[in-house]
Image (cartoon, helix red, strand yellow):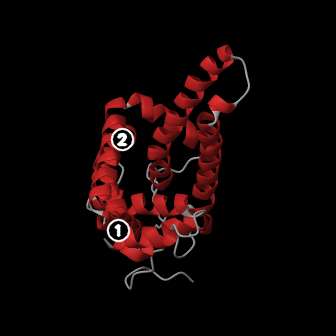
């Protein structure tokens, strides 16, 4: 419920709907894989980090959607040949449906993958059609949420979080096909790397080495441990341990 309320509040400016949706799915897709983290901190960091791309994608989608909706709604009043109308109406209607289906995927992709704008759209289009059964389930769930909201208007308060939580199971199942390591405990792996560095440093202390070798092995303090294959935004900087050899 808290996430739903946060989503509604951040959607008030309208232009921020894309970034708010990205943040909502970032938190929910982590929760369904037992990577809860810090609710408010992670939500707003995701909002900040993805704001530019999510907002631009949202504006593109809403602009194209409004143009298509206006054209479809006023097709009968447009003075063009009947033959051209027969072609334009189904084409624009199909494009409009495709736009909605892509919108179901694209903000979740932004939340969990690090891609440029072009690749993000291409990935959304690919997943919509490659995982058609999941796409149908997403649409059915969305319609179900809207129908429940029509019968019980107060349900709309928690509807965003409810929909995001249920569909996150479907999204993670898909994402693991492409990134099997998604949401695995990369911090445990970082700890192993850090311990190995300490062990090697202690060994180096006990034997004389050339100054050139020391220079090659020297690393800056508080270095980030960035592990490949995972789009996590916040790998914390590690503070030096008490037993870590001090550098002169």
Q: Residue 44 location, x and y as percent?
A: 49, 72
SS assignment at label 2: helix
Q: Which mark is residue 139?
A: 2
Which of these two is toward me, 21 or 14?
Answer: 14
Image vertical order of residue 41 relative to residue 118, above or below: below
User: Farthest residue in the top direction?
Assistant: 83
- Which label's residue is closer to the chain start, 2 or 1? 2
Asked whether the residues under the numbered discs 2 and 1 touch, taking CB atoms below 8 Å apart as contact, a structural biologist would say: no
Residue at point 47%, 59% (across, down) = 21
Residue carrying label 1:
157
Image vertical order of residue 134 relative to residue 246, above or below: above
Number of marks in picture = 2
Local crowd size for mark 2, using a 10 Å CA cut-off: few (<14), some (14–19), many (≥20): some
Say left or right for 181 vs 127.
left
Give the position of the C terminus as an image quadrant. Answer: bottom right
Residue at point 62%, 64% (across, down) = 212
Which of these two is toward me, 17 or 82?
Answer: 82
The image quadrant of residue 135 is: top left
Residue at point 64%, 42% (across, down) = 64
Image vertical order of residue 243 relative to residue 233, above or below: below
Give the position of the N terminus as an image quadrant. Answer: bottom left
SS assignment at label 1: helix
The image quadrant of residue 81 is: top right
C-alpha gap between disc 2 and disc 1: 20 Å
Which of these two is toward me, 63 or 203?
Answer: 63
Image vertical order of residue 218 relative to residue 173, above or below: below
Residue at point 41%, 62% (across, down) = 24
């Amino acid at each position: 419920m808290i996430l739903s309320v946060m989503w509604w509040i951040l959607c008030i400016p309208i232009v921020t709907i894309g970034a708010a949706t990205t943040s909502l799915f970032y938190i929910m897709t982590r929760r369904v894989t037992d990577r809860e983290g810090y609710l408010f901190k992670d939500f707003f960091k995701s909002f900040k980090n993805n704001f530019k791309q999510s907002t631009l994608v949202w504006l593109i989608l809403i602009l194209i959607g409004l143009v298509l909706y206006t054209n479809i709604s006023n097709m009968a009043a447009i003075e063009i040949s009947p033959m051209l109308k027969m072609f334009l109406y189904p084409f624009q209607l199909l494009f409009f449906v495709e736009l909605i289906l892509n919108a179901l995927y694209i903000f979740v992709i932004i939340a969990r993958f690090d891609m440029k704008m072009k690749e993000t759209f291409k990935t959304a289009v690919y997943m919509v059609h490659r995982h058609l059964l999941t796409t149908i389930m997403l649409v059915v769930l969305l319609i179900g949420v809207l129908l429940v909201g029509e019968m019980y208007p107060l349900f709309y308060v928690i509807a965003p979080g409810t929909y995001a939580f249920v569909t996150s199971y479907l999204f993670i199942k898909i994402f693991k096909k492409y990134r099997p390591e998604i949401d695995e405990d990369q911090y445990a792996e970082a700890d192993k790397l850090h311990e190995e560095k300490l062990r090697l440093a202690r060994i180096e202390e006990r034997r004389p080495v050339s100054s050139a070798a020391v220079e090659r092995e020297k690393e800056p303090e508080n270095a980030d441990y960035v592990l490949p294959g995972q789009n996590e935004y916040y790998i914390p900087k590690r503070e030096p341990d008490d037993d870590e050899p001090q550098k002169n």
